[in-house]
Image (cartoon, rainbow, N blue to C red):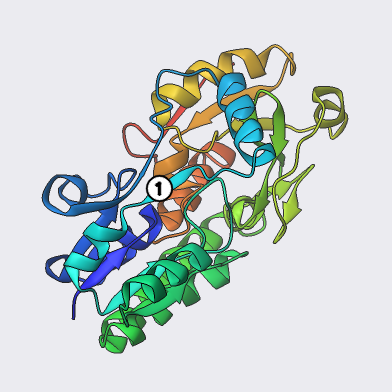
Amino acid sequence: MRVVSLLPSATEIVYALGLGERLVGVTFECDEPPAARSEKTVVVGGRDTKGMAPGEIDEYVRSQFAAGADLYTLHAGALAALAPDLILTQDLCRVCALPSGHVEEALDHLGCRADVLSLDPHTLDEVLATIVAVGERAGVPDRAAALVAALRDRLAAVAARVAGRPRPRVLVVEWVDPPFRAGHWVPDLVTAAGGTPVAARPGARSVQAEWAELAAAEPDLVVVSPCGYHLDGAAAQAETVARHFPGRQVWAIDADGLVVRPGPRLVDGVEALAAVIHPEAAAPPPPGAVQRIA
């Protein structure tokens, strides 16, 4: 079976299932594992925003949507040449990846008959269910079941360590200019790590907020997890966030690696958050996972 992944989290799932050799196509944002982008055909491109400030990125995204334009470009010819059997895509977020409808239209136009699986989880449990779904479609259901069981064992271990302890109020900021409150599975990560998510939207889309509104939630600690950034970028933005929360702990976290991509590494994110929320009980976070700013 030849597999194409049109979102970074799906690429991570494919490799976690031991199917890296079957993966033939990825997006320009698939950076984990590094071999995904260096050894596979890139079939989805987009604007490189690394040199842009968060406010500039927000303005660019809004202007593209207002003009009816897409953020991503499907290289249809390259996709057809790969002759995939299974394509992994999504409809969850137009900002995060190419919608599945665009893919299906392109396949119809090209006469391709690949199986298209849209991964659209809204909660942590649904993220784990997508791993099972990919395993079933790829013909390795036993591997998927074993992987999910191992991930659930790790979640249970965190729950046991933080059981009976006070649950601090935790605010996760998903974007800083303008600020966005956490949504989808992110509040679940906080809960699993032994905290109480505040100003959050569990299972729903992240939405814009005002700093005064977020401060009014009276968080005990703030975690800055901007979508599209690893720890260095998150830490730089957390310096600005800290000014809005004097006297509070402010932490930056590797957002792309641990929080915002709905794949197996979300459990790494739970473990890292537990180390921040309950340092006396949880295992220390690995290097490069979190950084205290204030």
Residue type (three-letter) at the residue carrying disc 1: Thr
Of the pair 118 and 233, the residue shown nearer to us: 118
Observer-nearest of 82 and 271: 82
Q: Please indicate, yes or no, whether residue 95 appears anywhere in the rendered image.
A: yes
Numbered disc 1: secondary structure:
strand
Tell me the quarter of the picture where residue 238 sits.
top right
Question: x, y (%) of residue 141?
Answer: 31, 87
Say if residue 283 shows up in the picture: no
The residue at the point 20 percent across, 47 percent down is 37
Quadrant housing the C terminus: top right
Near-viewer residue (111 or 35):
111
Look at 61% across and 51% down and name the residue there: 186
Residue 144 is left or right of residue 168, and the answer is: left
Q: Is residue 151 left or right of residue 142?
A: right
From the top left corner, tell me how far across and down residue 85 is, in percent. 25, 80
Q: Residue at x 53, y 45 (%)?
A: 70
Residue under circle 1? 73
Q: Position of residue 19 (x, y in %)?
A: 19, 71
Q: Is residue 202 above or below residue 63?
A: below
